[in-house]
Amino acid sequence: MKLTCVSCPLEYDADANRTRCDCGDLLDVALNSTNSVNSEVFDRRMNSWSTPDSSGVWRYRELLPEFDQQHIVSKPEGNTNLYDAPQIAAWAGVDQLWLKHEGENPTGSFKDRGMTVATSHAMRTGATMVACASTGNTSASVASYAAAAGVPSVVFVPDGKISAAKLGQTVAYGARIIQVRGDFDAAMTLVQQASQELGIYLLNSINPYRLEGQKTILFELLHQLQWRCPDWVILPGGNLGNSSAIGKGLAELKSSGMLTKIPRMAVIQAAGASPFYEAYRSSFRGFEPMEARTVATAIQIGNPVSYTKARRAIELTDGVVEAVSDEEILDAKARVDQTGIGCEPASAATVAGLHKLVRTGVISPGDRVAGILTGHLMKDAESVMEYHLGTGSERRPLAKQPVVIDPTLEALRSVLTHEF
Ligand code: F0G
C-alpha cells in the first residue's frame, strides 16, 4: 500500500502525513492488488454481529486499506437501506429507481463511511488531534469518531452557514468548534494550513483514506443488487469527494473481475454552487471556482478540492454533470419526504437531477437507476419549516401547513371536510 499522485509519477509512504503531492495535486491510496475478492465471503460476513464484519465498510476490506484490528475505529457504519422508490420513479419518468439512504449511517450522513477508515489511519499514525472544515456533516462525523477514538477534534465551520442540527450535533459529540467568518472554501483553506503548520491530522475528503471508506457506498449498493449493475448511479456533488470515491471504487471492482460493465455516473450540483458543472460544460477545458450560494447548505461549495479526481470519475464512467435550481431541489426533497423516506436538501439534488436528466433525454425511461441520498431528513429542520410554513410570497407546490383548531369535534369535522 502506498500513496500515488493523480497526475505525476511521484509516490509516498502509505503513512506519510500528507494530503497533496509535491507537485500540488491530489493523492490516491494505491492498494496491494494481491487480495482476491469473493462475493460469497461478503455474503457470509452479513450474518455476523461483530466488527469488523458487521460494518458495511469493513465487510469489503479486501478492497480497502489494510489496518490492524487494534487501530480500527468503527461504530459500525454503513448497512444502509436500498429503497425501491416506485412513486418517485413514476414522477421522474423511469421504470426502476432505487434510493440508497446514506442518512441512515450512525451520525446521519455518508461521511461515517469515510471517517471510519480515515480515523483508523489517524490512530495507526499516532495522531494526537484531528480536524476538518465542514458544512456540517463532516464535522458531526469527525466529532463522533474522534470521541470514539479518544482523540480531541477541532472543526472549522463557516459562521452562520450550517444548519442548527449539524452544529448542535458537533458540539454535543464534544468537538472544539471554530466558526470562521467566511464561506466553506475559506474554512477549507485555513484547515489545510493549520494541519500543515501545526501537525493536526486532517479528516477532510482531501485525505485519500476518507475516499477509501466512501467507495463502500457503491460496494454495498451493488451487493444489495446482487452485483447486477444499474445503468446509472446519481449523486450530489459539493466538495466532490463522493464522486471521486465512487469512480475509484468502480475502477477497482472492474479490475478485480467483480463487474463486467460499469454504470454511468451523474453528479448533480446546485445551480448556485456549480463550478464542476461549468467545467463539464466546457469539456473540462478549464475550471473556475465561484462564490457559492444555495439553500442546500451541505453543498454550498465554490472550490471543490477533489476536482481532478471527480473529473477522472466522469471520464471513466462516461458520466454527466447537471445543475438544478434551489426550487427544484426543495420540491424534490418534499417529494422524497412525502414517500416516507426523507432526506436533507443536498441529497434531494439527486432526485431533482434525475428528473431533469430524463426530461432532457440523457436518461432513458427504461434505464435502471440508483440514486444516493447523502443525509438524513433531521439534519436540516429549518429547510422543512421554511418550505411548509414559510412566509415566502409563493407557496411551494407540495407544502402542507398544519392547521390550528379549537379542541372541539365540530372544529375538527369542519377542517377534515374543507381542508384535506
Ligand atoms: N450531501 C451531503 C448531505 C453533504 O453533507 C455533502 C458534503 C455532500 C452531499 C457533497 O458531497 O463533498 O463528497 O461532493 N458535505 C461536506 C461537509 C462538504 O462538510 O459535511 P461531496
Image (spheres, grey):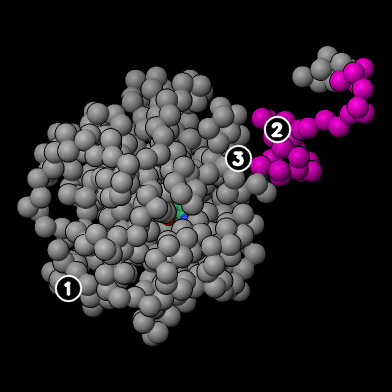
Left or right: residue 8 versus residue 145 is left
Q: Which secondary structure, mark 3?
A: helix
Give, as a three-letter code, the residue at label 3: Leu
The residue shown at (34%, 75%) is 127
* Relative image position of residue 258 (x, y in whole percent): 15, 37
- The boundaries of the magenta stretch are 384-412
* Relative image position of residue 5 (x, y in whole percent): 20, 67
Please say whether residue 404 is one of the residues in the magenta stretch: yes
- List the residue tagged with mark 1: 12
Determine if residue 129 is in view. yes
Near-viewer residue (106 or 265): 106
Image quadrant occupied by the N terminus: bottom left
The residue shown at (43%, 29%) is 83
Q: Which secondary structure, mark 2?
A: loop
The alpha-carbon separation of the residues under discs 3 and 1 comes to 44 Å
- List the residue tagged with mark 3: 330
The residue shown at (54%, 40%) is 343
User: How many C-alpha atoms fall within 10 Å of the one at disc 3: few (<14), some, or many (≥20)?
Assistant: many
Q: Give residue 399's mark.
A: 2
Q: Quadrant of residue 95?
A: top left
The alpha-carbon separation of the residues under discs 3 and 2 comes to 10 Å
Q: Is residue 71 above or below residue 268?
A: below
* Relative image position of residue 163 (x, y in whole percent): 62, 56
Please say whether residue 330 is one of the residues in the magenta stretch: no
Give, as a three-letter code, the residue at label 2: Ala
